[in-house]
Image (cartoon, rainbow, N blue to C red):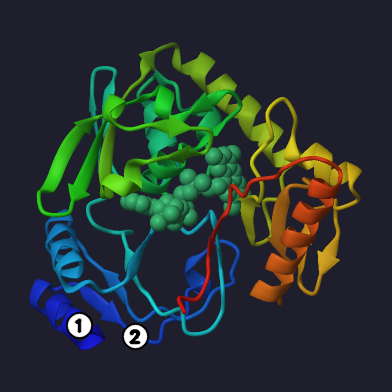
Amino acid sequence: MVEAVERLCRALDVEFLRGESLAAQVSLRIGGEPLFVARPSSWQSASALLEGLWKSGAPFKVLGGGTNLLIEEGALGFGVLQLRRCGGTVRFDGEAVEADADVPMPALCAQAIRQGLSGLEGMAGIPGLVGGAVVMNAGAYGAEMSSLITHVAVIEQGSGFKWREASSFSFGYRSSNVSSHGVVAGCRMLLKRDERSAIEARFEESKAKRLSSQPWNVPSAGSVFKNPPGDFAGRILEQLGFRGKRRGGAGFSEIHANFLVNHGDATFADAWGLCEEARAAAAKAGVVLDYEMEVWRRAL
Ligand SMILES: Cc1cc2nc3c(=O)[nH]c(=O)nc-3n(C[C@H](O)[C@H](O)[C@H](O)COP(=O)(O)OP(=O)(O)OC[C@H]3O[C@@H](n4cnc5c(N)ncnc54)[C@H](O)[C@@H]3O)c2cc1C
């Protein structure tokens, strides 16, 4: 099966790798080896490859910037389609903006600010790529992707590339059903024209807030848990004594109790064990904590 994927990749001029660890590809720097990593260099080849993968039944997952993932070590038993350099362009038309899914979010936000377009300045510090931000309905400081997106470009099984209205998907708090329709190739958003100096001031304000309240110079997967209604996961974890708590090389940050960080030699067992310990402690205190970070375990 992997040989057939390799042949398909060669025919489509898609980079194909075996034995590649995902640790270097994700912000937490933990992860094992997928069956293969395929890296298309255009949306056309990504679409053709996806059709082939779906037809073959080969198990695979889509990797964007890898900033929301905790991945188990060892042989993962599925392949990875890495969408990091398929086009990478942003197009502006008045207050409308169209971005490819492989554009880094900070780059999209910076370009919008330079154009004097408001809406993304609070999200400029969210790492990862546009596709991941659409799927996760990423957001910060009161803004989230779903309030700006008008259309999503999806590569769908059997029908290829399609622009769909955002209203045809459901978006929730740090979640959406977009990836159940297919793989995101891009999105269109509607921003608002404003004074560039006012946009820049809001950007600087959210940047300062982020830098003072989140760890930015250690490998991390961002927030581990979603905030429960009317409360903050960080506050709950702090109250339960998890701020700065370590297990092996993994820890909850000293700066933000809901941020999982890798102090250098963290293993999946360290990180997962610590997160589950925190979740169990919260449950004992009567609070259900749901994961915001996605966990990729080995396929059995
Ligand atoms: C330091 C730090 C700060 C963070 N701050 C925030 C924050 O303020 N707000 C916030 O919301 N998040 C935050 N995050 C989490 C993370 O950055 C976001 O969830 C981000 O949008 C994930 O994008 P990604 O490209 O890295 O996705 P990945 O981690 O690569 O993938 C996440 C999920 O999306 C899927 N996916 C990715 N790309 C596609 C695609 N093109 N098509 C279909 N499925 C796809 C993957 O399969 C996976 O299920 C932070 C993370 C870190 C490390």
Quarter of the image where one finds residue 3: bottom left
Q: Amino acid at mark 2?
A: Arg
Residue 163 in percent (x, y) is at 17, 36
Q: Is residue 114 above or below residue 75?
A: above
Say what secondary structure mark 1 lies in.
helix
Image point (41%, 28%), residue name? 146
Q: Say whether residue 102 is left or right of residue 165.
A: right
Any part of residue 123 in sight = yes
Figure quadrant of the N terminus: bottom left
Residue 180 in percent (x, y) is at 32, 48
The residue wearing badge 2 is: 18
Residue 132 in percent (x, y) is at 41, 48
Image point (86%, 59%), residue name? 245
Q: Amino acid at mark 1?
A: Glu
Distance, label 1 to label 2, CA atoms, is: 9 Å
| Residue nearer the viewer, 214 or 237 | 237
Q: Is mark 1 within 8 Å of ligand 1?
A: no
Any part of residue 101 in sight = no
**Mark 1 near mark 2, Cβ–Cβ under 8 Å?**
yes
| Residue nearer the viewer, 43 or 57 | 57
Q: Is mark 2 within 8 Å of ligand 1?
A: no
The residue wearing badge 1 is: 6
Mark nearer the N terminus (1 vs 2): 1
Give the residue furthest to the top.
Answer: 194
| Label 2 Cα crowd, 10 Å radius (few <14 / some 14-19 / many 20+) | some
| Label 1 Cα crowd, 10 Å radius (few <14 / some 14-19 / many 20+) | some
| Residue nearer the viewer, 255 or 212 | 255
Quarter of the image where one finds residue 17: bottom left
